[in-house]
Every structure is written in structure tokens, then in C-alpha cells.
Image (spheres, rainbow, N blue to C red):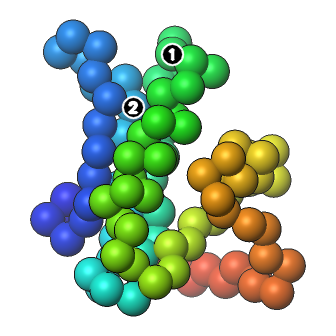
Amino acid sequence: MLSGSTAIGAWSGERLVGFVRAVSDGRFRAYIEDAVVHSSVQREGIGLKLTARLMEELAHIDIVSLFCEERLIPFYEKNGFRYSRSQRIMHRKG
């Protein structure tokens, strides 16, 4: 999972408390697949810092995309993401 990804973690001592990961073709497109912060440390700015650090790592990528719940749009806007009404999500399971 991690070998083809850019991943960044946040630690409290030896405990992983936050994690972001993007998959990419390495040049043109990247997709933020995971962004997780443990509930005990949410609202402390960890997610914002992790996402900002991930975006630094992906600065050479043309377009970085993600899917999120509507309530998280303001959070991602803080890192320069903009909501797009033109895209539709499609899934196919197994």
C-alpha cells in the first residue's frame, strides 16, 4: 500500500495519531486516499499540518484531488482545495 504512495504520519511518542497518504503517477495527478487523525487529538491542527506537509511533497504534481464529506470542505479549503460541482463520483465494488 505504501510503496507507491507519498505518506506522512504524526506521532505522539511512539503512538501514531495522524496519517495522510496520496497515490500518484509521480508527475501529473495525485489523489489523497487517506487522511486520518485519531479522535483524541482532533481539532488540534494536526490534520491541517499533515495535509499542508503532504501538499509540499506533492508540489511538483499538476493536479491533486480528493473526495470528502461535505462537512470537511472548509477544512480542505484551508489547504487551497476548491469544491468542484462538475465532477461526479462513481464506484464499482467487487
Q: Position of residue 73 (x, y in %)?
A: 76, 52
What residue lies at 27% left-to-right and 81% top-to-bottom? Answer: 26
Per the image, label 1 sits on a secondary structure element best described as helix
Figure quadrant of residue 44: top right
Residue marked by disc 2: 18
Q: Residue 41, which numbered label?
A: 1
Q: Position of residue 67 (x, y in %)?
A: 63, 65
Q: Position of residue 29 (x, y in %)?
A: 43, 83
Q: Are marks 2 and 1 in contact (CB under 8 Å)?
A: yes
What residue lies at 29% left-to-right and 14% top-to-bottom? Answer: 12
Per the image, label 2 sits on a secondary structure element best described as strand
Q: On the rendered image, what quadrant is the N terminus found in?
A: bottom left
Q: Is 12 left or right of 40, judged from the image as shown?
A: left
| Residue type highlighted by circle 1 | Val
Q: Crowdedness of circle 1 by 10 Å Cα count: few (<14), some, many (20+)? A: few
Q: Look at the image and tell me whether residue 43 can be seen.
A: yes
What residue lies at 74% left-to-right and 66% top-to-bottom? Answer: 82
Sequence order check: which comes first, mark 2 or mark 1? 2
Separation of marks 2 and 1 at Cα, in angstroms = 9 Å
